[in-house]
Amino acid sequence: MNFHEKIKSLRAKEKQSQSELAELLHVTPQAVSKWENNKSVPDLMTLVAISDLYGVSLDYLIKGDQKLQEKLSAGLKVKHFFISFGIGGTATILLFFVMGIISMVTGIEFFIHYWAAPGVFFLFFFSILLSPFIQSKKAIEESR
C-alpha cells in the first residue's frame, strides 16, 4: 500500500474530510487532495504530524512508497549540499581576507597568487568532505 492509499484510509477511518485534515496539519485542502491522488507527497515535518495525528509510525507511512522515499532523500541531499557550500564558501572568504591582510602587511603579492588558489580549492573541498561529520555531530548533540 502506497502513501496516498494510506492517508486516504486513515482519514476515512477517522471520518474526516480533506478540509478537516488540512486544517489540523496547517496545509491547504488542495495539498491533501494531491497527496491522496498521488500527485505530490508531503514534506518530512508534515509526515511527522500525520504520524502523531493518527498514531501510526513514520515507518508505516513511508515504507512501500518508493516515490515518497525518493522525494525525502532528495530533499536531504539538497539541504546537505547547501550546508556544505555554506561552510566551504565561508572558509574561502576568510582565507582570501587573511591572504589580503598578509599581502598588505608584507607587500608580497606573489603570496596570494601562489598560495591562495590551491589553498582555496583545498579548503573548499575539504569542508565539503567534512560536512557530513559536522552535521552528524550536530544531530547527536541536538538529540541529547
Image (cartoon, helix red, strand yellow):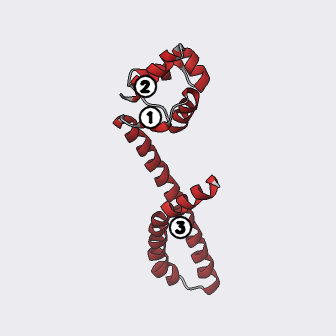
Give 139 or 52, whichever is nearer the viewer: 52
Residue that label 3 marks: 92
Question: Separation of disc 2 and disc 1 at Cα?
Answer: 9 Å
What crowding class fits label 1: few (fewer than 14 Cα within 10 Å), some (14-19), or many (20 or more)?
A: some
Q: Which residue: 45% across, 44% down?
A: 75
Q: Earlier in the sequence, mark 1 or mark 3?
A: 1
Q: Left of 142 or right of it: where is 6? A: left
Kind of residue at badge 1? Tyr
* Quadrant (top left, top right, bottom left, bottom right) of the C terminus: bottom right
- Badge 2 vs badge 3, beta-carbon distance below 8 Å: no
Residue that label 2 marks: 6
Q: Nearer the viewer, mark 1 or mark 3?
A: 1
Q: Which residue: 57% across, 55% down?
A: 139
Point out residue 114 in the picture as x, y percentages from the top left corner.
45, 81
In the structure shown, which secondary structural element does the residue marked by tag 2 occupy? helix
Give 104 or 47, whichever is nearer the viewer: 47
Residue that label 1 marks: 60
Q: Nearer the viewer, mark 2 or mark 3?
A: 2
Residue 118, relative to residue 90: is it above or below? below
Q: Earlier in the sequence, mark 2 or mark 1?
A: 2
Question: Separation of disc 2 and disc 3 at Cα?
Answer: 47 Å
- Badge 2 vs badge 1, beta-carbon distance below 8 Å: yes
